[in-house]
Image (cartoon, rainbow, N blue to C red):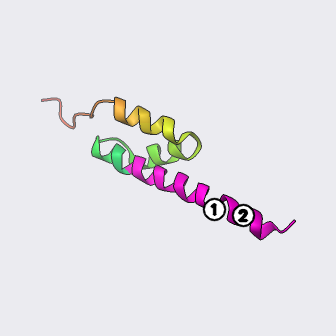
Amino acid sequence: MNHLSTFADGAPWFAGWGTLALINAGLAQGKNRSGLLWFLLSLPFGPLVTLALVVLPKVRSKLF
């Protein structure tokens, strides 16, 4: 079995999952949340984190 062909078969999957993690980080920052934290959560949980970010309300930056 050629190891390079095995990696090439999974490459689009990794690229899509990584892109989703970057999108989730931007979405989190737009809602005044930690982009790094949500990026790291997106790596193992991907679409579930996207759903959570869409459902959660925006964090207010000031109390008054």
Q: Is residue 27 left or right of residue 38?
A: left
Q: Secondary structure at mark 2?
A: helix
Residue 30 at x, y = what percent? 28, 46
- Residue 2 lies in the magenta stretch: yes
Residue where numbered disc 1 is placed: 11
Q: Residue at x 47, y 37 (%)?
A: 49
Q: Residue placed at 47% from the left, 48% from the top?
A: 39
Where residue 6 sits, quadrant-wise, is bottom right
Query: Going 44% across and 54% down the picture, which residue do you hit?
Result: 22
Residue 60 lies, with reference to residue 30, above or below; the image says: above
How many residues crowd around disc 2 within 10 Å: few (fewer than 14), some, or many (20 or more)? few
Q: Which residue is mark 2?
A: 7
**Circles 1 and 2 in contact, beta carbons < 8 Å:** yes
- The spot of residue 55 in percent (x, y) is 35, 29
Numbered marks: total: 2
Q: Nearer the viewer, residue 63 or 19?
A: 19
Q: Front-most of 63 and 39? A: 39
Q: Secondary structure at mark 1?
A: helix
The amino acid at mark 2 is: Phe
Task: Note whether 1 is above or below 26 in the view shown.
Answer: below
Classify 10 Å Cα crowding around label 1: few (below 14), some (14-19), many (20 and above): few
**Residue type marked 1:** Ala
What range of the chain is rendered magenta? 1-25
User: Which of the labelled discs sits on residue 54, or is there none?
Assistant: none
Q: Residue at x 83, y 69 (%)?
A: 2
